[in-house]
Image (tube, rainbow, N blue to C red):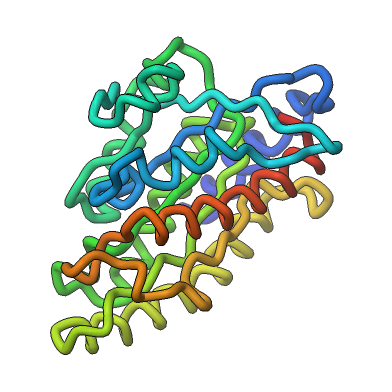
Amino acid sequence: MLRTSIRSLFIALACLAAFALSPASARATCRIEPFGDSITRGVGSAVGGYRYTLVEWPPLVGGSPLSIQMVGAQIDTTFPGLVAENQHYHSAMSGWRNDQLAAAAASLPPYPVFPEYLPPNIVLVHAGTNDIHQGASASSAAYWLQQLLVALSVKYPTAKIVVAKIIPFGPQLEHVIRNQVVLQYNGAIPGIVNNLNAFYPQSNPKFFIADMHAGFPTNHLWSDGIHPNDYGYYEMGVRWSMSIQAIAGLAGC
C-alpha cells in the first residue's frame, strides 16, 4: 500500500517536471541550492568552500559560463567574497545527520527564502559524513539519505538533484573504521538513485551522482581529517561543476 502511494506520488511529480522543462535559453540563470552539512557550508575554508569555486569559475555550457545564483534557507556572512557577489546563501546545517536533514527538507519553506522565493533548478547534496562520524552504520545512513532525497523531490518537483558520494575521512587511525563505512555508504548510493529515477522517464532523470570520493586527495583535508582545506574544496567544486554542466547542457537551467 505504501509503495503504491509513493509510486503514485513520483509519477505525478515526474509529469509536472516534464511539463516544466524549458530550454537553457529560456532559463538564463541557474539557481543552485547547496544542501547538506558543514562541508557544504565550507567549514575550514577561507573563501567559502566549493561554493566559491562554482561562483568564480562557473561551468561552461554551450561554450559560455553558466550564470549562477546560489539560493537557500540561510544567509551566511562568513565569507566576504560571496557576500559581495550576493552569493552567500545555502541550506547547510553543521553537524546534522541525514535524518535531521530529511526533517529539515520537509519542514523548511516550500522555496528557498534567500535571495527570493523561487525554486532551485539544481540541488547539490553532500550528506552522510556526520552520520558516520557519530557512529551510524552505512545502512542506516543510506536509509536516511533516501528519505532526504524523497523529501527534496517532493519539495522541488522540477529541480534536478545531485547527490555526492561523500569525500573520505583522513588517514588518521581514528578514521580507519569510518572510511570503511564510507565505502559501504557510497556503494549504496547508485542503487538509491536508480530506484528513485525509476519513477521518472528514462530520458529525463531527476537524480544524479557526483563522485567526490574516488581519487580525492586526503592531503587536502584539515588536520581534523573531516573538512577539506581550500585545495580540497576546489577539487569538490570542479566535480560539482562537471555535474552541473552535464545537467544544464541536457535540460537547461
- Report x, y in % for residue 117: 46, 11
Q: Nearer the viewer, residue 46 or 182?
A: 46
Image quadrant in which you'd find residue 144: bottom left
Q: Nearer the viewer, residue 220 or 203?
A: 220
Q: Residue at x 25, y 24 (%)?
A: 77
Q: Specify whether 198 is left or right of 83.
A: right
Q: Residue at x 66, y 53 (%)?
A: 242
Image quadrant in which you'd find residue 231: bottom left
- Report x, y in % for residue 244: 65, 44
User: Quick one: quadrant of the C terminus?
Assistant: top right
Q: Residue at x 57, y 39 (%)?
A: 9
Q: Nearer the viewer, residue 163 or 76?
A: 76
Q: Tell me: residue 49, above or below residue 17.
A: below
For this orientation, the residue located farthest to the top is 116
Q: Residue at x 32, y 87 (%)?
A: 180
- Report x, y in % for residue 42: 31, 45
